[in-house]
Amino acid sequence: MRPFEYIRPASVAEAVNVLSERGEDAFVLGGGSAAVVMLRLGVVRPECVVDLGGIEEMRGLQRNGGLHIGALASIRSLELDDGVRAAYPLLAEAASQVANVRVRNVATVGGAVAYGEPQTDTPTALTASRASVRIAGVSGERSVPIDEFYIGPYETVLEQGEIVSGIDVPEAPPHTGGAHIKFTVGSPENKPVANASALVTVDPASSVCVAARVVMGAAGPVPVVADAAGALLGDEPSPERIKEIAAAAADEADPIEDLRGPEWYKRRILRIVVEQALTCALQRART
Amino acid sequence: MCAATSPNVTRLVGQSMPSLEAPDKAAGRIEYMADLTVPNMAHAKVVRSPLPHARIVSIDASEARAMPGVVCVLTRDEVRADPDVEEVYGFVYRDAPLVAMDKVRHQGDIVAVVVADDLDTAEAAAELVDVEYEELPAVMNVPQALAEGAVQVHEEFFPIAPELRPIEGTNVCHHATIGCGDVEQGFAESDFVYEDEFIAPPVQHCALDLHAVISQVEDGQITVWTNCQSPFPLGRELERIFKIPARVIIPYVGGGFGSKSRDRIECVITAAAKLAGRPVRYIFSQEETFMTFIRPAYRNRMRTGVKKDGTIVARHNEFWVDVGGYAISGARSANNTLKVATGPYRIPHARVDCYAVYTNKPPSSPYRGLPTTQHTMSYEAQFDRIARDLGIDRLEIRRRNLVRDGDIHITGDYLRSAHSHECMEQATEAIGWDEPLPVDPEGKKVRGRGVSCTIKYTLTPAREMSENSAEVALGEDGIFEVRIGTVNIGQGSDTVMAQIAGDALGIGLDSIRIIHSDTYRVPVDSSTTASRSTYHMGRAVVEATDNLKPQMLEAASQLLEREATSLVFTPDGIAQANGDAGVTYGELVERVGSPLAATGDCVVGGSYQGPDGNSYPIASTFWTFGSCAVEVEVDTETGTVRVVKAAASATTGTAVNPHSIETQLEGGVGQEIGPTLFEQLVWDDGGQLINAALLDYPLPTMETMPDYAPRYVDHPFEGGPFGAKGMGEIGAVVVPGAVVNAVYDATGVLFHEMPLLPHKIVEGLEGQG
Amino acid sequence: MNVNLTVNGEALAVEVPPSTTLLDLLRDRLGLHGTKEYCHSGVCGACTVLADGKAVSSCSMLAGQVEGADLITIEGLTPEEGLHPIQQAFVDNFGLQCGYCTPGMILLAKALLDENPAPTREEIIRYMGGNICRCTGYAGILRSVEAAVKERGSWS
């Protein structure tokens, strides 16, 4: 690996200061599971690496009306935390499907969000959960809805010197069900061909949908929020209706041909995972 | 012969036992190549071609050489300037320059070697080596390479092995045929003729222990540490190239599966070490292994003529193997499989054409069974098509055609221990062939079963010779040291040899020490490949013990002043038959004053005298037969194929270490599920490999594992050590054929191309795409 | 830079260049060769070690990231005499062939059994699914872990 200077700030303020000072010479390290590989391969060749791992204030999960996920919280903590599993099962379910347990132990939620990789699971589920991203910079902190956070593959609204300091997820109303479905070729640890998260709220009296959100991953340059989910509102959809909505959602996606399949196939898989996610989410919302 | 002969009892042979080194492996105490260092060692980084085919205009390494910490840079200029270095490597096909001379022939081809005090410096300096290329048109696959007017990857051919025959003026570096009867007559006599074409992709072995080498050239002597599977041929090649003696030392090897059988990197690094004047270490990165040795792309066009009852009358089989930029290994590997391309079937009229073709892909190397795996997939898939078309049961059509003892194979060999029927019956029974298949209530997932049968050769010289020796030496500590060239690559060879030596000597494992694969400490062996070690090295070990015993008796007889005929071997020493005091093995050596040692050879090749009194050629010392039955589940919506159950069966002769055989079969099946279902290397239009790393090249995991049911047929094989023969490749070889047939059974669609990627399955089922 | 950490129970302060990975630190600086390298991208698991009890890929972490951490490598799992029960289970059940993936597999199994003393077969497969073995087809590894689970009562 090429030599670099290593800086481990102890606070967000210290981190954003050093990042703004060093500008393009600096490279941010979260958990490192993607960053260290990039450093080894020489994909990035920074003069200095800023390791956020020592920033205490960016750790942990807090529930207080909503869920605050410290940027340094590991994917695995999202998967295992009892509170998350109870109140945000969609997030726990998506987290449990990311790569392998070694990666999940180290990779951070903030890193997964900031990296902007389209072929992963956590951003899909966070988008479905209407999360917002807290961004820290020298001029202070701002919060951006996650729908507006992504610009393209590996491209976000983060400006030079800014970092993701945390993610806020609003608490879902009662009678909400969520599900995340990941489809891979070969082992489930592999990158998804496509994935989908569905979050649905039903009126317990009438059983009709009162809120519905469907987000597709590996479906385009950024997580794709399916407008087709709107058709669920006021409806108690039959399996056939869910199929139609899933097909409409898949049509909204913009997948590209890659090693995991041609475009037509990914669209087909998107239809299947959306259907499965919706079916499962509705079932959970009703129980 | 004296009274004390080899005991016929087997106490170790036939016992399932974990490998001798298993506790050290579990403790992480075993040293592999990457764990070794030598004093004053420098580190190498190889400058590799980014282009698949290009002429080298210039190489400027001056900046790299000037970098502090850089020891030297090896380029074509240094190689050419050294009169004591031969420029070109290859002991089968001599076509690979140590470093690129005039041009590069594949992405990753070796252009220069930068040697520095540490690896970081070597890597940084390697980026400063300025190479100017003039890009040439590349031929990235066999059809392109065979097209009219295609650029020639090599202008001249240099086959070394006598059986290799290039076609001048083309990219065919080897074409050969094998046959029997009269194929045209056979087709004329057939009721039906079927023609199919099958394709299998290039894949990587992904042996986790990365290929690595340390080379030292000192005082006119080369010493190379490497995880190569062929230490003796490599040593001879080093001596030819550098004209000085070479010693090759192999530590424990973390898997090879053929990838480490004969790469040229040891010679390249030796040239660098010679230039550096100090030992040099080089360890491949995972990405580099993907550009250095791969299982070749394969295509097979097969015509088969049958009678109405399914009896095969004629077969013409043409197959093309993409050997990549250098044929250092691929051409002969392809040629070897001519012997098995028609399968374990009686075919009166057959012809097989083998074409090994240069392209600008990375060089090919064997992969656990060579193209036997792809041959088996091809003839077995076609066989199921024929069975279905003729309305004959799939097992029955095989029973009607499988070879039996005494049949004459296409090579002219007289087949012995040909228990392919038993293998098939065992494998199918093991998965519950006749039981009803589970039915998915939603109708999305369909199940099916498939079977395949195979025949596999082992490497066998064309003439009678001994390339396989062992030495057994009794030391003062009373330990019998068994010295073998077999590389311990994880297959359990040390254990099997200890079991064989122990029973041959009537002693326990505690009295045996295995010394393996150091060309200065063990006698010659050709290679650890092709399922050959148990048979060949096992026989050499038995013969060495047979030669040692008279020496021990003679020594004991003198010491005890008793007739040799009154002495008997015991587990601890030589005793007197009448119960008087004997001598322990340790004392025997101590009192003789020097170790007692003997060598043994395994002479193979030549001819076989059949029971009919006729003489038959031996194209393979033994043939291993095998079969696999699988049950698959096909998700018709997503196209996912899951192998639910898999039973592989092999003819093993006497099972020396039964559980080791079972785990070899499980391992072979588990590995081959990857290339069958999802592994394949992919190049973009610019000839760049786009998935040279595990992140983009997923492998089988515990989650893709089927329920295994390994089986074996253990009739002792005449001539084998305690009746044993080899089987290490069979588990892999039989998989794709069985899976393709199971998918055919489940869906009614016969797929002709591996891997069975989900989108291909959907295309096949729905005619999409 | 200076890194303070505990490796196999021993508190250490190690001076390394910042670009050193945890894997390099263990292998090259501390001579703990039981931790292996292959893919160098967090996929294969040959480099698995335990950091504060959690299984991690040592290839994908910088040495600086384990400041203050408590690390266990295969050398630390292995008792002075004999083998740890999980190691013994791998030996007895043919859970290894070439042995290269074995230290990582055993440490991953240790992490699993520490988290979940009685995992089901499905839970074992899901947890162990990330680590690559090229020799065994995984059957022997699964048998080994299941055997270790059965023996779980006899060790801690």
Image (cartoon, coloured by chain):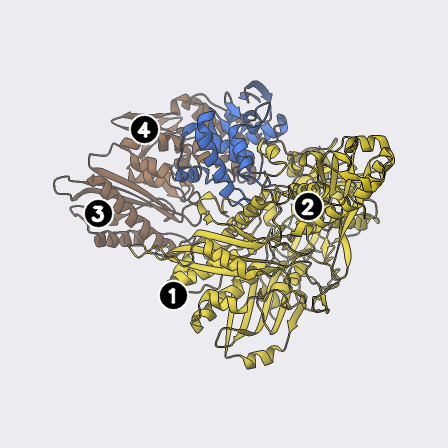
Subunit ID for the residue under disc 1 = B
Label 1 sits on residue: B767
Label located before the other in sequence (2 or 1)? 2
Q: Looking at this view, is B107 or B21 the one in front?
A: B21
Q: From the image, state the color of chain A.
A: brown
Q: Nearer the viewer, mark 3 or mark 4?
A: 4
- In the picture as drawn, the residue positioned furthest to the left comes out as A205
Q: Nearer the viewer, mark 3 or mark 1?
A: 1
- Kind of residue at badge 1: Gly
- Cα separation, mark 2 vs mark 1, equals 46 Å
Callout 1 secondary element:
loop
Q: What numbered label is drawn on residue B176?
A: none
Q: Looking at this view, is A160 or B335 the one in front?
A: B335
Callout 4 secondary element:
helix
Picture coordinates of residue A184, whole percent (x, y) = 41, 48
Q: Do the CB atoms of the residues marked 4 and 2 lie less than 8 Å apart?
A: no
Picture coordinates of residue B377, whole percent (x, y) = 52, 61
- Cα separation, mark 3 vs mark 4, equals 31 Å
- Cα separation, mark 1 vs mark 4, equals 47 Å
Q: Which chain is blue?
A: C
Callout 2 secondary element:
loop
Picture coordinates of residue A170, whole percent (x, y) = 26, 32
Q: From the image, state the color of chain B.
A: yellow
Label 4 sits on residue: A82
- Kind of residue at badge 2: Cys
Residue positioned 48% across, 37% down in the render: A34
Subunit ID for the residue under disc 2 = B
Q: Nearer the viewer, mark 1 or mark 4?
A: 4
Label 3 sits on residue: A230
Subunit ID for the residue under disc 4 = A
Left or right of B225 in this view: A44: left
- Cα separation, mark 4 vs mark 2, equals 51 Å
